[in-house]
Image (cartoon, coloured by chain):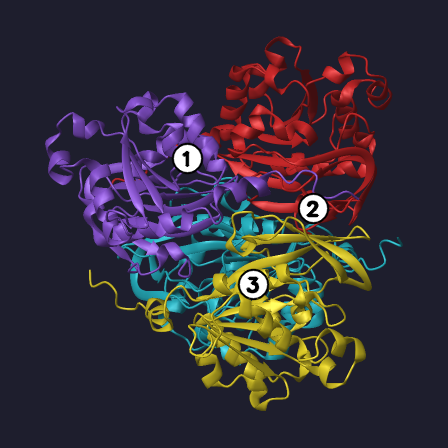
Chain colours: A cyan, B purple, C yellow, D red
Amino acid sequence: MRITVWNENVHESRGDAIVAQNYPRGIHGAIAEGLAGHFDLAEGGADSVRTATLADPEHGLTEEVLDATDVLLWWGHIAHDQVSDEVVERVHRRVLAGMGILVLHSGHYSKIFQKLTGSTASLLWRNEGERELVWTIAPTHPIAAGIPNPLVIARQEMYGEPFDIPVPDELVFVSSFVGGEIFRSGVTYTRGHGRVFYFSPGDQEYPVYHQPEVLRVLANGIRWAAPTLPLEEQVAKHAPHGWFEG
Amino acid sequence: MRITVWNENVHESRGDAIVAQNYPRGIHGAIAEGLAGHFDLAEGGADSVRTATLADPEHGLTEEVLDATDVLLWWGHIAHDQVSDEVVERVHRRVLAGMGILVLHSGHYSKIFQKLTGSTASLLWRNEGERELVWTIAPTHPIAAGIPNPLVIARQEMYGEPFDIPVPDELVFVSSFVGGEIFRSGVTYTRGHGRVFYFSPGDQEYPVYHQPEVLRVLANGIRWAAPTLPLEEQVAKHAPHGWFEG
Amino acid sequence: MRITVWNENVHESRGDAIVAQNYPRGIHGAIAEGLAGHFDLAEGGADSVRTATLADPEHGLTEEVLDATDVLLWWGHIAHDQVSDEVVERVHRRVLAGMGILVLHSGHYSKIFQKLTGSTASLLWRNEGERELVWTIAPTHPIAAGIPNPLVIARQEMYGEPFDIPVPDELVFVSSFVGGEIFRSGVTYTRGHGRVFYFSPGDQEYPVYHQPEVLRVLANGIRWAAPTLPLEEQVAKHAPHGWFEG
Amino acid sequence: MRITVWNENVHESRGDAIVAQNYPRGIHGAIAEGLAGHFDLAEGGADSVRTATLADPEHGLTEEVLDATDVLLWWGHIAHDQVSDEVVERVHRRVLAGMGILVLHSGHYSKIFQKLTGSTASLLWRNEGERELVWTIAPTHPIAAGIPNPLVIARQEMYGEPFDIPVPDELVFVSSFVGGEIFRSGVTYTRGHGRVFYFSPGDQEYPVYHQPEVLRVLANGIRWAAPTLPLEEQVAKHAPHGWFEG
């Protein structure tokens, strides 16, 4: 499994104190480290994880990087419009060709999620550090394997319905908040040969990405989103013209 | 529109004080009266509503009654096992042939709902008269037309996930409760040529079926569940053998 | 019902003989005329239909036209890239706000369908004037009401799987062709508050849009895709911030 | 992986010549042998396969056998009504508790499939040994991994729409036949914690279960349907009462 964790990395770069306390090596760093318990990431191991950020050349998402990525994780918040359309097109093409993608939290407003879904992805929100309960709706789904029901997140930003997304292929999680709001917090889609998983828990102001159950969801999501076939076979199936000379 | 409201009518028959106060003419009576604002139920009107209960001969659901029913509403709670298998089979056959059915609240454990879904329909519950917020998830669905988002029910029994049902064809409503539980409170299915709508708000201990927004949901549900074609045409489409002499 | 039929109108403008024979007043003209049997389009009638084409200023899809359109039909084939991005954005916004859209035949490759679906919408094709059988998969769906099963189209271009689209909300029709190919020929989606219906039969080289059953599908689709609420109410539901002061 | 292949075994027991030629050790025997290339079935291997038939005591499906089964395959045709209701209930309970089930070909009319789906599962059919093309609709689905598109079955009984089943959770395959019929030949459901895969190719009169691609579909289906968690954990998630003392 070749994983790339992309983070806008703007809150961190600005030196925001709360964010620095939660994520001293960045949200991307925390996620990459947290995945170590779920994949074989040691030197010479079967799996690998790399990180990329907005400030990198081509945002760190060159053709070479994407060609060597099975699953991409995407975290962004306040700089969605700084992501170049060219990189968005490139990521989109690669997803259609079979790369999995996990869109995280405020990434719902990213260009790539809007492009994949055809929707605005607008939602209700309120940031008061409320308790979020993440309920499993699809108990047999591999992304829910081993996740407590409910998963309790002590402090979190509220995201609520209406969440302007297409009807998901699969509704895995629905969350509730103390104010009574609910939110489809774990949803899947397919686009072309690529699999898409959106998971909402996770904010720069709370240490959500250090919580073991959350990291397990991400690890499950990565395994679920990985291509079912090597890319070459995916593409071959995608273009079967001439199959039949009747 | 020919509507039949079926109610177990056991709480009412026992003379339970709270139930009698909420529903002096029975839950079936309250629903039938409440629909008057949504259908043309006057003498000679285009629509009609009748009621039937467990204690009636054949539970009031004879072949004649079902043949004259476009949409059946089903409320039951403590006497599911007293419903005869023969009547359940009859209702099931009629649903497959095109009759719509609305299964209400504790009707989730009815024989007919279990037979239609193939599931146990088990759920969490707690009866403390909590506030329920019913959130619209499918804003373009005709069942949600004109329903406030959220619909606030002041006092209600809590029903919570995990709700052991098949993945719905359409998820229309999801509720939250004060304890933090969530519930898929409005879901649709099709079985054969029949449409099925399950709606959870509504309990004998609370006057939920007098609330105008709830009655509007029921009226919307009835219109949605009504056969799209006259029964004869449905059956003709159902058995198209011999369509093609290639 | 306020209907707008948009047609690229390029084959017709070029004076192609077969197209002129099939559609002397254009594909848009044929569809608009064919809908007369299904809507009240007479002077002063309850419904209205207008047409618009690529060559019109702003392709005939100004803000004023879209504001006065409940359902838009879209036919395009060889000039998708000549449709301005600005108009595509405008149509997209309007769909999210509640306008229905029917995308027809080769419109699968239009910018608006790709934007709504996030997919390439690529498919197999072969143009040999084969018989297409359109099978109803969702017999209770209002779009299938009154449609023979199968609907037989004598001569048609073959469109085949793999069809690179998202999993539909509803699969209404699947077609087969003489070569053995199959195709999801009638699929629905929702995006925001808008409903989307893609229907594949219909090509400039065959008189498909004169076939009464095909026109009935279009009429059914228009009724299904129409906003369930007036636009103002849709928008109000779409932005319920501040709903709850708990 | 602990696999149990159940076969009615009535055609074989009657000594039908064609069936004996196709399946000298029974359909169950052919499938069990064919799975050897996909699982570690050697003595002491990680996986195991057993067979059971109608004539066995309790049809070979005792509590002990089911408790030791991760995935059950079900083939039946002319003796559905000889399967005892008690065994059907037992299998149903076990599916809800997490056992996967593959229902094959004419098993669509089995009691267990009707109970799981709530439908009649009626369909069109014609037995003339026609070519069936099995098209992949869900290219990223693990059941489709490595399957040619289309999978060509030289001679097969025709099964056609309308197929009276609930809307599938996932539509994996759609077949076409020479007569122009189409059929949803690979569909999935979940019921409780159990996963259900129906796959239509396979008839006693044709050697379909010897075809390597068909066996790969079955192997893929078995892996997909296997419980995502050990049964004990499934059950624990199924009954989370008392999770929260708010």
The answer for which chain carries disc 3 is: C
The answer for which chain carries disc 1 is: B
Closest to the observer, A5 or B13? B13
Q: Which residue is mark 3?
A: C197
Q: Tell me the residue at 58%/35% (across/down).
A: D196
The answer to which quarter of the image holds residue C232 is: bottom left
> Whole-percent x and y of residue C152?
70, 54
Q: Which residue is mark 1?
A: B67
The answer for which chain carries disc 2 is: D
Dot 3 surroundings within 10 Å: few (below 14), some, or many (20 or more)? many
Q: Which one is in front in this view, the residue at disc 2 or the one at disc 1?
A: 1
How many callouts does the rendering have?
3
Q: Are marks 3 and 1 in contact (CB under 8 Å)?
A: no
Report helix, strand or loop for mark 1. helix
**A206 lies above or below A63:** above
Dot 2 surroundings within 10 Å: few (below 14), some, or many (20 or more)? many
Q: Which residue is mark 2?
A: D174
> Whole-percent x and y of residue D41?
74, 25
The answer to which quarter of the image holds residue C15 is: bottom right
Relative to residue D130, is residue B60 drawn left or right?
Answer: left
> Seen from this angle, which residue lies furthest right?
A245
Is any part of residue D162 visible from this angle? yes
**C234 lies above or below D226:** below
Relative to residue D240, is residue B229 drawn left or right?
Answer: right
> Seen from this angle, which residue lies furthest front?
B44
For the residues marked 2 and 1, what is the alpha-carbon distance in whole angstroms? 35 Å
Same chain, labels 2 and 1: no
Report helix, strand or loop for mark 2. strand
Is any part of residue A138 visible from this angle? no
Q: Tell me the residue at 29%/48% (across/down).
A: B180
As shown in the figure, which amino acid type bears the numbered disc 2? Val
